[in-house]
Image: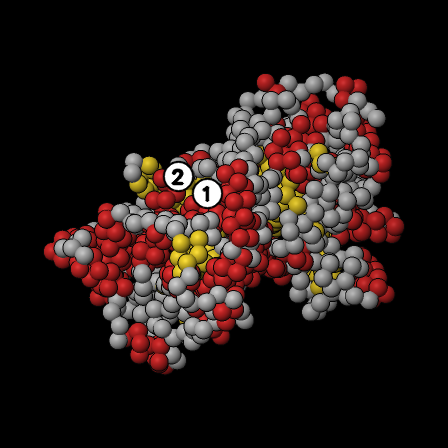
């Protein structure tokens, strides 16, 4: 094996001017099995001890225990959860009949110590035991947890749940809950009166959610959680942000009246008010918590994985949770919270994908709290027709996640459910779900008439009292509140809203939107310019390249590397680095990533099998053949390394994983986040994330993301679904102009680099620019090992940049060129070969390496040299209605005055799966551009 010292001078890190940005310990990345221990261990000795005693009591009273356990298992099925009383609950489940367990309803008393967790642990009759169990498990609140596998955890749950219900709620908390409920109601009434045609997706009927939020925010704050990242869809979102998260109602009212949420100098086109991001500091008992509500699109539940991704990025920067030095530290500082609709929870696949992320090493955030605001309808669909299980929450059962059901008519129970959820999440670092059954006072929005479709339900709803008024009555009856002060609070709140509205309505009022973007860790970034196209020096010193290159394949002495990997990967790379030439794709990638890490940026790559690489080319994470342990060479650049390469072999999901990684990328401009598709075709499983966030996020919310999508692309006979990353779809969604020269102000970059060096610069550019843009890369498959597809180290050195256009490097006299062929991607190599075979001297091949923004200047500069060229051909291997043709054709014509001729497959709807047909087409697209038009 080559040794580093034979090849390079040691690169001196202390000379590196770039700040060290993150502060992680390398051990987090070395051995996944060693670090990511996010499982409940019976480390709570008290619990294990308690379980022993409990088992003893259970054995002594086994029939009684079976009866008690039946309530814990089935009690929720007869609980009084529906405020509208529509359920056909069979109150006589045989499982809950004491006779089933051979128990008589007589005056015999039983010792109940350890069996139930009542404060009075004396002896009870069966009727008394039953009453107790009914109150806990079958009244207006219940819990499902019997599917949980860890006995200590189950014991903890039953104990805490039973204790929680007997714990009194402080008077001040009850008054706070009342205040929130009354405000929420007043807010809805205010909007209804002032903006009668505005769809507000009111919380009316589900106001107890406010009590739940209060318990989550205050409970987390009191448990020293510093930040909460959360997501919610439309229902009650405005109530939450205005009544609890300090959103200035002036912004909301100005927005409803059609004003922009941004200042005039910004080109963003904004979003509807129900999608605004919002963040604020809240304080409870002197403890502060920063709450960030993420921006969401209309696509229900799409925000879910983003919340987790952003929370994880924050955990990384604050060494929290799985990034902590203490493996038993289950998220002490950063928490996540998702609020779902009942129909969306049951229906949207991304919910299940998000749950699936919850315990995976590279995606876990140490437990998310979930709430379903279960108003028993999805638009017009009754919830029992929107699911195949018994409850809308059933999905969570498969994830070992306790489910608390609560009747939304009781805000205090909602509050208690929240308290329990916080305690559970803090104890076990696992997801927990609360299903709050409530109702929806109006139609899906307030302009809908719900009685068209659900007349009986709405008869009940229209004849009942509101939840805030019911709760007010309880506190008034208990003399805890007096109606005068409740009225006054509501009046004050309404006056505050009225004042905000009158400001917006004044003729001379100049609405000054808040600057909500590029703050905090983004403050060194700027918006991209709309009148320039910038080029960045993305090269590195030769010393750094060699250092990183060698380190990228340096393994511990006792590491047993697979012989093929050693020969084809390690030795080959060392040779390439030594010679400074024939740098292949994976080496260029390692150099880009390693150099960024050495400059203080963290890099995260996520996707299916990314450690090895789908095509066995990356080997960024190697496995010791003796013991299965993994090793990531780029996390061992230096003993004092502070930034790292997080390699995340994802589960088989595109949508949630891409959403997670996009969320991760939103947190800091100093993390390069890469999502790689197994094959480019599979990105469409994540189409919602691409449409609603990646391609449009900055334009809607001015939130930048430097997320990179690597989408292996290329027609190589692999069939209809392993050939194309459908670059045409990305191009269609690009904001590039058809009749103007593009600037940096583009929604995302789209590139198809053909040289390792260009790929190197492209990746590095993501971090070197003073703004962030998503980057879509049609990445290679067969170029990974194509002998001609290599670069020199020289091409990656300082003062070199990404080349959006690569001029023909093989021709001598440009004057002799008659035909210029433009090509995008790996098809270039096939054409180059063919031209050589044909011995043509009058044809130039020009590579367009990036299409969005369209490199008009660069093409013009190149074309000025081909004075005698008469024919201009666009050659692609894709079908005419695919690939880049319909994107490039008008731009060449309108901006450059070049009328292109088309060469490529004819329009079609799919890609050939028959080998012979593919071969014929492949031959055709190689020959055609050299023939007569
Ligand atoms: C992916 C998606 N499909 C359809 C819609 C249209 N839509 C908006 S709200 C809604 C019903 C949602 O019901 P639920 O999740 O129970 O929330 P609720 O409105 O009842 O609070 C539908 C179908 C949407 N916004 N997103
Ligand atoms: Mg609903």
The residue under the point 23% across, 53% down is 179
* Residue on which disc 1 sits: 426
The residue under the point 67% across, 41% down is 759
Query: Is 625 on the left or on the right of 592, as rendered?
Result: right
Query: Is 910 on the left or on the right of 566, as rendered?
Result: left
The residue under the point 70% across, 54% down is 679
Q: Quadrant of the C terminus?
A: bottom right
| Above or below 470: residue 821 | above
Query: Is 767 on the left or on the right of 190, as rendered?
Result: right
The residue under the point 78% across, 49% down is 782
Quadrant of the image occupied by residue 189 = bottom left
Residue closer to the observer: 922 or 724: 724
| Above or below 866: residue 63 | below
Residue closer to the observer: 668 or 85: 85
Asked whether the viewer can see residue 361, the reply is: yes
* Residue on which disc 2 sits: 223
Does label 1 or label 2 sit earlier along the sequence?
2
Q: Position of residue 20 (x, y in %)?
A: 54, 26
């Amino acid at each position: 094996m080559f040794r580093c010292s034979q090849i390079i001078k040691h690169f001196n890190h202390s000379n590196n001017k770039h700040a060290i940005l993150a502060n992680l310990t390398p051990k987090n990345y070395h051995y996944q099995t060693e670090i990511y221990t996010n499982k409940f261990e019976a480390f709570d000795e008290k619990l294990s001890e308690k379980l022993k005693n409990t088992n003893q009591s259970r054995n002594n009273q086994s029939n009684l225990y079976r009866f008690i356990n039946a309530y814990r298992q089935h009690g929720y099925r007869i609980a009084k959860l529906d405020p509208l009383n529509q359920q056909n609950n069979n109150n006589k489940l045989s499982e809950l009949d004491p006779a089933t367990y051979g128990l008589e309803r007589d005056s015999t008393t039983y010792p109940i110590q350890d069996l139930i967790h009542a404060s009075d642990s004396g002896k009870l009759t069966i009727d008394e035991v039953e009453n107790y169990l009914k109150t806990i498990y079958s009244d207006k609140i219940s819990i499902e947890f019997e599917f949980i596998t860890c006995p200590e955890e189950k014991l903890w749950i039953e104990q805490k749940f039973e204790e929680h219900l007997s714990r009194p709620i402080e008077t001040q908390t009850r008054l706070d809950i009342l205040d929130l409920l009354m405000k929420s109601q007043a807010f809805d009434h205010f909007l209804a009166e002032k903006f009668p045609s505005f769809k507000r997706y009111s919380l009316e009927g589900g106001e107890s959610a406010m009590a739940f939020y209060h318990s989550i925010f205050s409970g987390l704050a009191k448990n020293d959680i510093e930040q909460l990242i959360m997501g919610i869809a439309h229902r009650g979102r405005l109530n939450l942000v205005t009544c609890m998260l300090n959103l200035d109602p002036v912004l909301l009212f100005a927005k409803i009246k059609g004003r922009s949420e941004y200042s005039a100098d910004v080109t963003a086109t904004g979003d509807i008010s129900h999608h605004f991001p919002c963040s604020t500091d809240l304080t409870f008992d002197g403890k502060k918590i920063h709450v960030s509500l993420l921006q969401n699109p209309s696509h229900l539940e799409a925000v879910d994985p983003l919340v987790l991704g952003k929370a994880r990025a924050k955990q990384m920067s604050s060494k929290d949770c799985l990034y902590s030095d203490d493996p038993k530290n289950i998220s002490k500082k950063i928490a996540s919270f998702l609020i779902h609709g009942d129909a969306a929870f049951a229906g949207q696949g991304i919910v299940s994908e998000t749950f699936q992320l919850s315990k995976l090493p590279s995606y876990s955030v140490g437990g998310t709290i979930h709430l379903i605001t279960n108003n028993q309808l999805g638009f017009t669909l009754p919830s029992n027709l929107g699911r195949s299980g018994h409850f809308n929450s059933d999905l969570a059962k498969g994830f070992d996640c306790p489910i608390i059901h609560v009747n939304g008519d009781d805000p205090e129970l909602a509050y208690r459910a929240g308290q329990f959820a916080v305690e559970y999440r803090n104890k076990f670092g696992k997801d927990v779900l609360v299903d709050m059954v409530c109702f929806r006072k109006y139609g899906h929005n307030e302009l809908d008439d719900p009685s068209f479709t659900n007349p009986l339900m709405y008869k009940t709803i229209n004849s009942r009292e509101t939840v805030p008024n019911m709760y007010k009555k309880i506190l008034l009856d208990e003399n805890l509140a007096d109606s005068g002060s409740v009225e006054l609070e509501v009046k004050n709140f309404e006056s505050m809203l009225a004042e905000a509205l009158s400001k917006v309505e004044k003729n001379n009022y100049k609405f000054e939107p808040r600057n909500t973007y590029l703050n905090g860790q983004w403050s060194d970034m700027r918006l991209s310019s709309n009148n320039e196209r910038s080029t960045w020096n993305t090269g590195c010193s030769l010393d750094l390249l060699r250092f990183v290159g060698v380190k990228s394949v340096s393994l511990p002495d006792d590491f047993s590397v697979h012989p093929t990997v050693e020969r084809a990967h390690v030795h080959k790379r060392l040779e390439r680095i030594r010679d400074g030439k024939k740098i292949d794709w994976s080496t260029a990638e390692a150099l880009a990533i390693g150099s960024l890490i050495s400059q203080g940026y963290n890099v995260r790559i996520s996707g299916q099998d990314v450690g090895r690489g789908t095509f066995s080319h990356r080997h960024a994470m190697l496995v010791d053949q003796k013991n299965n342990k993994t090793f990531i060479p780029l996390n061992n650049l230096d003993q004092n390394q502070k930034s790292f390469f997080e390699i995340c072999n994802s589960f088989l999901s595109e949508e949630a994983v891409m959403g997670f990684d996009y969320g991760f990328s939103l947190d800091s401009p100093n993390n390069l986040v890469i999502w790689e598709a197994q094959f480019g075709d599979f990105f469409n499983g994540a189409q919602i994330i691409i449409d609603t966030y990646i391609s449009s996020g900055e334009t809607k919310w001015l939130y930048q993301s430097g997320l990179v999508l690597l989408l292996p692309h290329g027609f190589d006979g692999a069939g209809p679904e392993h050939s194309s990353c459908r670059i045409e779809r990305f191009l269609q969604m690009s904001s590039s102009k058809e009749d103007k020269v593009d600037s940096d102000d583009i929604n995302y970059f789209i590139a198809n680099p053909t040289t390792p060096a260009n790929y190197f610069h492209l990746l590095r550019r993501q971090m070197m620019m003073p703004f962030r843009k998503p980057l879509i890369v049609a990445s290679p498959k067969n170029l990974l090992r194509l002998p001609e597809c290599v670069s020199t180290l020289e091409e990656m050195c300082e003062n070199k940049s990404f080349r959006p256009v690569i001029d023909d490097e093989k021709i001598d006299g440009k004057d002799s060129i008659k035909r210029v062929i433009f090509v995008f991607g790996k098809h270039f190599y096939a054409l180059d070969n063919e031209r050589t075979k044909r011995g043509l001297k009058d044809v130039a091949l020009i590579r367009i390496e990036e299409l969005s923004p369209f490199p008009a200047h660069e093409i013009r500069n190149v074309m000025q040299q081909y004075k005698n060229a008469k024919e201009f051909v666009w050659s692609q291997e894709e079908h005419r209605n695919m690939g880049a043709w319909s994107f490039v054709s008008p731009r060449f014509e309108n901006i450059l005055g070049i009328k292109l001729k088309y060469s490529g497959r004819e329009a079609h709807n799919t890609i050939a799966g028959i080998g012979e047909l593919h071969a014929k087409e492949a031959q055709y697209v190689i020959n055609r551009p050299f023939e007569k038009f």
